[in-house]
Every structure is written in structure tokens, then in C-alpha cells.
Amino acid sequence: MNTERTTCLVAGGGPAGMVLGLLLARAGVEVTVLEKHGDFLRDFRGDTVHPSTMDLLDELGLGEQFAKLPQRRLEQAQVPYANGTLKFADFTELGGRKHPYISLVPQWDLLDLLAGAAKQEPTFTLRMNTEATGLVVEDGRITGVEYRTREGDRGRILADLTVACDGRTSALRKAAAMTVRDYPTPLDVWWFRVPRMETDPTGAVGVVSHARAAIFLDRGTYWQSATLIKKGTDPEQRRGPVRDMVASIAEAAPWLADRVDALKSWDEVKLLDVRLDRLARWYREGLLCIGDAAHAMSPVGGVGINLAVQDAVATATLLAEQLRRGTLTTTDLAKVQRRRMLPTVVVQGMQRFLHARVLTRALDGDIDMVNRQKPPVPMRLVERFPKLRAIPAYAIGYGVRPEHAPDFARR
């Protein structure tokens, strides 16, 4: 079995892994990122890039390149009700911000941008078609990973630090037998696309009726769409025609009535198994988990990717110097968790609240915004005082404790 060595091994070439690799390489740290796929050209559902991440790209000198990527900007979020449409979040109310919007960008374009920038650094290596399958452990300390290539070759890469960025089904956190705290979730999500017409609403549109709770993200020529289903009911609900599902949404969103036959089969509807969990401790000696590997998020608010990127920035900021000097300790790893725990707890707490108080009721048909003559009191307040729309916009766009690029990574 072939054995190699690096200073920091990052498992997973998603946004968090690529940002971490880029930042560490700019600090002069030898870093290797493993990505199990051969390219980034895959169908991602999480294509939102929030203002905090766009600010980071500006700080890294990548803002102009990012702005040239094909994208759609969401400036507001709205919900229809019986007497009209109500905006509940407006990013243009974030006065003075350079990016008062959310960008919907194909994630493969974002990852290609980050990879291209990282490859300019002499200490960066990206290994595609290479999956981290297990851990190398010596005297209780994690000293690297075992990997497998698409061709079936196997080997080891030893490292001073291994960072698991391999998502909510992380093979590395499982191999490390880390303690996970799961929070029950009442829902799963169906993702699909329907064509968008110029006469349709714009931005992010939520629909809540007695029959369906759904959200539509404006991608220009199509809607990236999601509808909620009760946890574990996917097989049962697929027994009827897929048309019936779209038609039930169109009852609440009449502008979709001419597209109830847009989906030809259930194969076009992808299931997201919603999870909400958090590691009790994000690290072991020689190993650190960040992003979904440390804390799987609900899709509520669409903040999971951007929270993972913030984890990566904090990791590089706190650990780059120790990695470069070869003085990294477990105490240093604990600093990352302490720094990122508050944002994680706040976001997951809000998601749990919305699951219990809003989404569960929506799934039971107890909330019907479409046929309701008056919206709930909080929404009436934002209708009366538009400046209040900046509060949910800031919570979604920046959240608690947004991170900024360390000086060594700025260009």
C-alpha cells in the first residue's frame, strides 16, 4: 500500500473543504484535498451563496471572478396570502452592504473558482477521484487517512491534521466513533424543477396552504422548487401520479396552473432526508470535523453551506500558524469548536423552533396562508414597518458571528 505525507489532509472537496484548502495554502501550509468525484459537474441542491460568503470572496480577491459566473440574484423573500403577497425579508434593506442579495450560482462553478485559485499556491494539492475511506490511527492518535481511487488503487496519506469535510454522512466521523446528538425532524423534502415564466413572481416565494408547504427559488428560466413531506412518507406518497403533487401546489400558487404536467415522472423528484444533528465534540487528537460533518443542518433558511464556509475560515484563522510551525495540539482544535459553537447552536435552535411551531403545523394543514385574510402578527408588522424586513434578511445572509478572511489569505 502506497504511503504519502502532507501537513493537513482535507477530506471532501465541497465549499468548506475547498475554502479551507485555499486559505491554508495561502498561509504556506502543505495541504491536500481529497474529492471522491472526477469533477464538480453534478446536480447540487444547495446553490445559494449568501452575502457573508460573497464578502469573503471579495477579501480573497475573487469577487470580480465570482461576479462573472452565471447567477440569479434574490433580493427578497415573499409569501402569498388571500389579499396579496407579503415580503417578509428584504436584503435591499441591509443599508450600505456591498451584496444586498443572495446569489444563486451553480455550485460547480463556485468550486471550480475556488479550486483554480488554490492551484496557484505551491503547497496545495487537489486529488480528484480519490475518496477517504478510513482513518490511520497510531497509539490512539489519528495520523491520516486511508483512501481509494476510482480505479481501485488504495493507499494512505499521513498528516499532522485530518479535517473531515465529507458531509452529513461523514465516513471519517463514523470511523472515529464520535458521539452525535440527533434532534428529531418532522419532515423530509422533495426537490424538483419547473419552468419559470416572465409573468411569474420573482425572488424566493414561499407557499403555505392546507395542501402543501413549498418554496420556489427563482433561477431565471426555471424554479428550483422544494415541497415538504412528513418524515418517512416518501414511498407512500409516490404511489399516485406526480402530476397530482404539482397540482396540489398550483392550488396555492395559481401562476403554476399551466405547468402541472411539467414533471413527467417521479424520477425528476429527488428526496432530501432531512437531518439535524451535532457532534458533542468536533475533534479528536489529529482529527477535526467541520461543516455538516460536525453539525448537519435542516434546509430551513438555506444556511448550511454558508455556515460550513464560516467554519472553514475560522479553522484556517485559528490553526494555520500552528500547522506551519508543527506545534498543533488538541487544545488548538478545541478553539475551533468554541468559536463556531454559538452560531451552530443559534441556527439549529431556530430551525428546531420552526420545525416544531411552524412546519409541523403546515404539514398537518393547520396553517393556510393562501386562504387566510390576514397574515400572522409578525408578518403584519413587517408589512407596516418595511425596515423590519432587514432583520430576517440579516439573520439569513450573515447570521451570528460571520467570519472574515485572515490577513495572510487576502489579495
Image (spheres, helix red, strand yellow):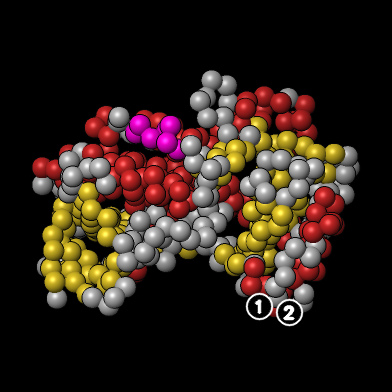
User: Is residue 65 magenta-colored?
Assistant: yes
| Relative depth, front residue between 73 and 157 | 73
| Relative depth, front residue between 260 and 9 | 260
| Residue at image location 51% in from the left, 57% down from the top | 44
User: Is residue 79 magenta-colored?
Assistant: no
Which disc, if any, is residue 239? Answer: 2
In magenta, the rendered stretch is 60-66
Looking at the rendering, which quadrant does residue 76 occupy? Answer: top right
- For badge 2, the amino acid type reads Arg
Residue 55: where, in percent of width, then height? 44, 32
Residue 328: where, in percent of width, then height? 15, 47
Residue 155: where, in percent of width, then height? 19, 72
| Residue at image location 49% in from the left, 41% down from the top | 69
Q: Is residue 379 left or right of residue 13?
A: right
Which disc, if any, is residue 235? Answer: 1
- Total of numbered circles in the picture? 2
- Label 2 environment density (alpha carbons within 10 Å; few <14, some 14–19, many ≥20): few
Residue 193: where, in percent of width, then height? 66, 58
